[in-house]
């Protein structure tokens, strides 16, 4: 398969997958159990969901490793299973997609706060990302997806560790923002311009944002990333901001809503589009219908 | 600037060593511990909380201020206990059963302590019964619950029901928060308050005990 960076360099727009958490729960992930346990206990479900997104038209299929750094796994007493959890997660997606899609290794936050704000030593955090990255690299992934980050220091440690472990694999790094009176910032105070430059400096090949908002706001975030980024931009929006209907939480943006807003998103020049919380294979299918697939 | 104003100022600047030294000076000078707490430490944390609420500052500054708060509290708390100074009230907090997300909850705990509340943090993945049992055992006036997963929000209703069943509604108020939670959801389940973020949690808590 062509390197993603080559595809982006020739102007391709690539489609990622949507939410996994909701699908895992629908397939029986008990509330409270870390999703990474499903990789160990029910890998067939991982393959099935990867297959659903492949069939919906996603080119980048995410591995079930968002919380699979040893620091995060240690909250569940699973740090000693780091290598298994990461390796088997990659294998499950690869079995489902073969060479029909790119395997994108998800790397999420450790859940810890770095000194001096929290109690975690940067060296400890770097080592945790290095260990996760080594396992993912050895398992053979096509892309690393550092995501849902709010702290630029943590994101930088993750990207650097991955770059060291996998010198030739492209890295995508996205952060989650809030809307403030002075513009978009993460809760840790990182601006879009700081994110775009910082992530690139650390070694990211693709930068952008995931989570936090539906498409309308993400379109504005996309515009600002394009202003500040020297590399291609990725956007993974939620299916809107959750609302409560009859005691249930619902993500209101439908595949039709996505379809109506896609032209404006594409006009910003974003080159990787996917879905975050609340999105489904149907959202991806709707996007696929409007984004031509080039090989 | 008097010592208490200096304590507040240095707390806002997140200098834990200065706050520690100034608190020591204030104690040695005979300043009543309740004044050090309210006019020094809490006063400083209130300013921090308000600036964060409007995102004039961000989490790093809040966390540094919290560390400075703890530096002062380490010296003052034993004196307050000795003199039986009442706090603003006791709040039991936790992330509900099935939910392991805790950074938001931890921040609420920090801000509530900064506001002078006694905080009992039960951690994450807390069963409904444990919230209520702890609130009764600790004589808490508020139960604060957090959820980030939409599937775990139902536990909040269980806690409301339990408090009702045990006839505790007049003495224990229930506050909820978390990204998928809303004021509407809080009303539907019969909670007493909804807090959008940690700074709002302090405002709501004060109203509930006030």
Image: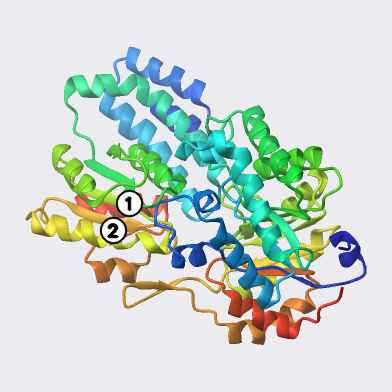
State the quadrant of the N terminus of chain A: bottom right
Q: What is the x, y in percent for residue B70?
A: 41, 28
The residue that appears at 60% across and 75% down in the rendered structure is A281
Question: Given the image, what chain letter belongs to the residue carrying mark 1?
Answer: B
Q: State the residue in front, B26 or A243.
A: A243
Q: State the residue in front, A81 or B47.
A: A81
Name the side, left or right, on which A250 lies relative to A215: left
Question: Given the image, what chain letter belongs to the residue carrying mark 2?
Answer: B
Residue A88 lies, with reference to residue B148, above or below; the image says above
Secondary structure of the residue carrying tag 1 is loop
| First reached walking from the N terminus: tag 1 or tag 2 | 1
Q: What is the x, y in percent for residue A72?
A: 54, 41
State the quadrant of the C terminus of chain A: bottom right
Q: CA distance from mark 1 to mark 2?
A: 7 Å
Name the side, left or right, on which B102 lies relative to A289: left
Secondary structure of the residue carrying tag 2 is helix
Determine which residue is flagged by label 2: B155
Residue A150: which numbered mark, if any?
none
């Amino acid at each position: 398969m062509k390197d993603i960076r080559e595809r982006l360099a020739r102007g391709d727009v690539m489609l990622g997958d949507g939410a996994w958490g909701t699908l895992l729960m629908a397939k029986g992930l008990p509330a409270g159990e870390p999703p990474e346990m499903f990789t160990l206990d029910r890998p067939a479900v991982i393959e099935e969901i990867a297959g659903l997104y492949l069939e919906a038209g996603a080119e980048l299929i995410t591995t079930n490793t968002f919380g699979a750094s040893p620091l995060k796994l240690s909250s569940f007493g699973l740090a000693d299973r780091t290598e298994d959890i990461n390796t088997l997660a990659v294998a499950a997606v690869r079995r489902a997609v073969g060479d029909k899609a790119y395997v994108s290794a998800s790397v999420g936050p450790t859940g810890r706060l770095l000194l001096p704000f929290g109690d975690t030593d940067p060296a400890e955090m770097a080592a945790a990302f290095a260990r996760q990255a080594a396992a993912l690299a050895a398992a053979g992934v096509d892309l690393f997806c550092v995501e849902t980050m709010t702290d630029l220091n943590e994101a930088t440690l993750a990207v650097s560790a991955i770059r060291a472990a996998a010198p030739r694999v492209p890295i995508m790094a996205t952060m989650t923002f809030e809307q403030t009176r002075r513009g978009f910032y993460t809760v840790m105070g990182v601006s879009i311009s700081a994110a775009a430059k910082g992530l690139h400096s650390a070694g990211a090949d693709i930068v952008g944002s995931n989570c936090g908002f539906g498409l309308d706001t993400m379109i504005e975030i996309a515009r600002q990333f394009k202003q500040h980024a020297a590399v291609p931009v990725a956007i993974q929006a939620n299916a809107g901001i959750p609302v409560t209907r009859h005691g249930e939480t619902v993500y209101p943006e439908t595949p039709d809503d996505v379809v109506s807003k896609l032209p404006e998103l594409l006009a910003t020049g974003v080159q990787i589009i996917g879905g975050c919380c609340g999105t489904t294979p149907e959202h991806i299918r709707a996007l696929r219908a409007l984004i031509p697939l080039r090989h | 600037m008097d010592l208490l104003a200096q304590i507040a100022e240095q707390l806002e600047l997140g200098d834990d060593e200065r706050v520690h030294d100034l608190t020591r000076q204030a104690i040695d000078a005979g300043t009543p511990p309740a004044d050090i707490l309210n006019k020094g430490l809490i006063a400083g944390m209130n300013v921090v909380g308000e600036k964060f609420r409007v995102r004039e500052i961000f989490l790093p500054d809040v966390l540094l201020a919290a560390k400075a708060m703890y530096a002062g509290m380490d010296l003052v708390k034993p004196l307050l206990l000795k003199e039986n100074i009442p706090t603003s009230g006791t709040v039991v907090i936790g992330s509900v059963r099935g939910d392991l997300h805790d950074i938001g909850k931890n921040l609420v705990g920090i801000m509530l302590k900064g506001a002078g509340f006694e905080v009992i943090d039960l951690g994450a993945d807390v069963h409904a019964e444990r919230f209520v049992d702890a609130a009764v055992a600790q004589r808490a006036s508020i139960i604060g619950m957090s959820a980030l997963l939409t599937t775990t929000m139902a536990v909040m209703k269980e806690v409301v029901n339990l408090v009702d069943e045990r006839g505790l509604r007049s003495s224990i108020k229930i506050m909820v928060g978390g990204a998928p939670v809303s004021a509407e959801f809080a009303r539907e389940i019969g909670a007493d308050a909804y807090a959008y973020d940690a700074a709002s949690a302090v405002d709501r808590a004060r109203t509930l005990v006030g």
